């Protein structure tokens, strides 16, 4: 298994299967579920694309003109496109607006596995989008992880 995080280049070897870890980050509100899922994938021959940046700086302007912010967003967009599987977790204590955007962007592609437990503020919206586009939706962490492992 290889793990890539921004700002490192997305160097996924040809033919390798890649899993993008989309979902709640909101520093301080979301547990580091990405680390737990990465540990569950440890014995798999995959490349993990984890957008949880180790040296995130919340003072960056959220603007196309802010090179570090733009680089982060473009890394995520490139990773989502390159991924064979997008593992998307909506943590109940978060709002996850970017994850909701990514759900809409990738719902039709057939590569999403979504976890959305009770308590997520827009669970109904997530349920409806997943039902409309045939996206596997899991209400518990355990079934979500099992579904991701089954896809890789």
Image (tube, rainbow, N blue to C red):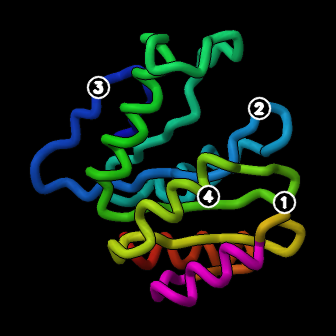
Q: Is residue 31 left or right of residue 20?
A: right
x then y, percent, for residue 124: 76, 79
The answer to which of marks 3 and 4 sits earlier in the sequence is 3
Work out which quarter of the rendered image holds the C terminus and state it. Answer: bottom left
| Nearer the camera: disc 3 or disc 4 | 4
| Residue at 38% over, 64% down | 85
Tell which of 136 and 144 is nearer to you: 136
**Marks 3/2: CA–CA distance:** 23 Å
Residue under pointer 1 = 92
Query: From this viewpoint, which residue is outermost toward the left?
Result: 14
Badge 2 local density, few (<14 within 10 Å), some, or many (20+)? Answer: few
Q: Is residue 130 magenta?
A: yes
Q: Which residues are magenta?
A: 123-136
Q: Is residue 112 left or right of residue 120?
A: left
Residue under pointer 3 = 9
x then y, percent, for residue 106: 41, 64
Secondary structure mostly taken by the magenta-highlighted segment of the chain:
helix
Residue under pointer 4 = 100
**Marks 1/4: CA–CA distance:** 13 Å
| Residue at 85% over, 64% down | 121
């Amino acid at each position: 298994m290889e793990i890539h995080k921004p700002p490192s280049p997305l160097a996924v070897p040809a033919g390798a299967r890649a899993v993008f870890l989309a979902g709640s980050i909101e520093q301080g509100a979301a547990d580091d579920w990405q680390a737990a899922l990465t540990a569950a994938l440890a014995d798999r021959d995959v490349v993990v694309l984890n957008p949880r940046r180790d040296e995130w700086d919340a003072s960056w302007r959220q603007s196309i003109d802010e090179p570090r912010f733009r680089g982060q967003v473009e890394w995520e967009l490139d990773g989502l496109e390159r991924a064979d599987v997008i593992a998307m977790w909506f943590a109940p204590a978060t709002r996850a607006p970017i994850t909701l955007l990514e759900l809409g962007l990738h719902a039709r592609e057939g590569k999403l596995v979504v976890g959305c437990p009770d308590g997520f503020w827009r669970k109904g919206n997530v349920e409806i989008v997943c039902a409309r586009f045939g996206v596997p939706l899991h209400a518990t962490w355990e079934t979500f992880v099992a579904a991701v492992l089954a896809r890789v």
